[in-house]
Image (tube, helix red, strand yellow):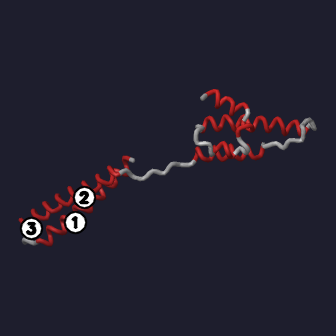
């Protein structure tokens, strides 16, 4: 495999019609693509210099295309990776909401035990517990991430 890569680096114009084809080659790593394009760029620079000194055979230099392709390769590497929150973080929020609801319902039962018995107070305390538990877990997950 290394011999194949070495051949691509030594003679990229024999294997690819255009520099952008190097980017779309799925079997090459980014480092191998860079090596191939850098070699191609060096060849194109030498040809451009020879042309400037009237020493070429009339071939056109690929310098501009190779340079653009290298910029594209660098841009591909520098693109930020966006990740979504993991499912475990979301279940942690759900678990905290349930726990907060249970604690809130228990607090509501205690309140009704010392004051006027009311199912509305228990429900309100349970909802408050759900909200507080969910917010606390979401903040904890955000701080950990």
In the rendered view of the protein, which quadrant contains the N terminus? top right
Left or right of 113 in this view: 42:
right
Residue indicated by mark 1? 127
Task: Give the residue displayed 19% in from the left and 69% down from the top.
Answer: 124
Distance between mark 3 and mark 2 Cα atoms: 22 Å
Distance between mark 3 and mark 1 Cα atoms: 16 Å
Please name which of the two marks, 3 or 2, marks the residue nearer to the observer. 2
Task: Give the residue displayed 67% in from the left and 29% down from the top.
Answer: 6
| Residue 142 pos. (x, y %) | 37, 51
The image shows residue 83, relative to residue 14, as above or below, that is: below
| Residue 82 pos. (x, y %) | 48, 51
| Residue 72 pos. (x, y %) | 66, 47
Q: Which mark is residue 63?
A: none
Residue indicated by mark 3? 112
Task: Give the residue displayed 14% in from the left and 70% down from the top.
Answer: 121
Q: Element type at marker 3?
A: helix
Q: Nearer the N terminus, badge 2 or badge 1? A: 2
Residue indicated by mark 2? 97
Q: Element type at marker 1?
A: helix
The image shows residue 4, relative to residue 118, as above or below, that is: above
Mark 2 closeness class: few <14, some 14–19, many ≥20 residues within 10 Å: many
Mark 1 closeness class: few <14, some 14–19, many ≥20 residues within 10 Å: some
Distance between mark 2 and mark 1 Cα atoms: 9 Å
The image shows residue 108, relative to residue 96, as above or below, that is: below
């Amino acid at each position: 495999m290394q011999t194949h890569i070495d051949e691509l680096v030594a003679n990229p114009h024999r294997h690819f019609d255009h520099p952008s084809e190097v980017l779309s080659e799925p079997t090459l790593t980014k480092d191998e693509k860079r090596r191939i394009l850098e070699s191609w760029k060096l060849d194109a620079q030498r040809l451009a210099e020879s042309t400037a000194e009237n020493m070429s055979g009339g071939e056109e230099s690929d310098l501009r295309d190779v340079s653009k392709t290298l910029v594209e390769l660098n841009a591909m590497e520098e693109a930020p990776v966006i990740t979504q929150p993991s499912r475990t973080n979301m279940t942690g929020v759900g678990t905290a909401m349930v726990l907060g609801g249970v604690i809130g319902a228990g607090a509501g039962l205690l309140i009704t035990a010392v004051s006027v018995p009311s199912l509305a107070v228990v429900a309100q305390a349970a909802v408050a517990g759900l909200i507080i538990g969910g917010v606390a877990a979401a903040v904890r997950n955000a701080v950990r991430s």
